[in-house]
Image (tube, helix red, strand yellow):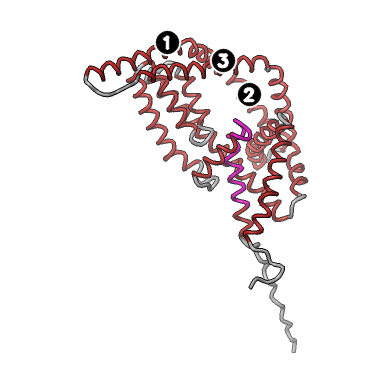
Amino acid sequence: MRVAGQIAPWLTWALALPLVVLNGWLLLTAVNYLQPLVNILVIATVLSFLLDYPIKLLQSWGIRRSWAVLGVLLVALSGVTVAGITLVPVILKQVNELVVRLPNWLASGTAQVEALETWAQAHRVNLDLSGLAEQLTTGVSRQLKTLTTQVLGLAVDTVSWVVDLLVTLVLTLYLVLFGERLWAGLFSWFPARLGTLIRQSLHRNFYNYFLGQATIAVILGTVMTLAFVLLQVPLALLFGLIIGVASLVPFGGAVGILVISLLITLQNVWLGLKVFATAFVLGQMNEHLVAPRILGNVVGLNPVWIVLSLLLGAKLAGLLGLLIAVPVAGSIKSVADNLRQPPPRPPEVQPVREQVVV
């Protein structure tokens, strides 16, 4: 017989679930209303997390924090400037070349599909590919038009984008300088144990995840670019960069490899197969040899939950949601696991025996 005053667990969840859903909907509505300020704040927070560790490393060498902040910011800005001067013009040139070449690649792919269908008919093989070429051409053309529209829209919104970038950089600087006091004040509103768990979990998961994913993306993008150059793949730098950037998101590298291989197959089947085989082998080596040593078990999530968190993040916040979905989900799991454990008991104080002096 249930003691009076106790509530069944299922009834507790049934009462709490509508409140959680309602609060989540209100939070999502507020986030959408405050855009792009929320995106700017999230990006600046992530950047400040990543910049804080080299700053602390310099501080451990005896350098004052103000000088450490200045040095790290100068190195970061110098790297971005050098990359913008050297890589951006080449990448834009290759993007323009891809737009020019794509119609010819589509025509070549259509011709190869028709040749395969002719061969199948000559050998009495039941292979109907009549609609595949048309669907392929229509689909790629539609995506190309969408990409062109987005590029034009980006050109129109350039002024707004520059303003957002400047605000993000300024906010990142202030978070690096004064973020410690800001987060301490915000988390002081939580219960002591919960606030400490949330803060430590977010800091650990975001830093480990982004540092690990960025390292893996740089390694994979560099290796893929070199392999494409050796295979004499057209637009090698652009394709390697696409795979590297896609690797920032879990499973994104595999999707990038598949898309690039299909694009090259439109031009040359054998080259596309070689690219796919090479990229697949390098991707597997990176995933099973390099990634475990760098990432380890960073977020501790089941792959199913990773996929679900990516889908939910993309639905709620687009590209930014894809980037932060996994560390946020890992932080929630870490906090929940710690809350399920009972808090440690304080050590018992042994009574001091009085010594009798004779």
Dot 1 amino acid type: Asn
Q: Residues within 10 Å of mark 3 (few under 14, many from 20)?
A: few
| Residue, far left | 123
Residue located at (60% from left, 40% from top): 207
Residue range in magenta is: 315-335
Q: CA distance from mark 3 to mark 1?
A: 18 Å
Residue 227: percent from left, percent from top? 40, 24
Q: Seen in the image, is 279 located left or right of residue 28?
A: left
Query: Which residue, given by chain and number where applicable, does mark 3 sit on?
Result: 148
Sequence-first disc among 3 and 2: 2
Say if mark 3 contacts mark 1, CB within 8 Å.
Answer: no
Q: Seen in the image, is 78 located left or right of residue 247?
A: right
Residue 245: percent from left, percent from top? 53, 28
**Residue 31 seen in this snapshot:** yes
Q: Secondary structure at mark 1?
A: helix
Q: Seen in the image, is 237 located left or right of residue 120?
A: right
Whether the magenta-drawn stretch holds residue 329 is answered as yes
Say if mark 1 contacts mark 2, CB within 8 Å.
Answer: no
Specify the quadrant of the image occupied by residue 191: bottom right
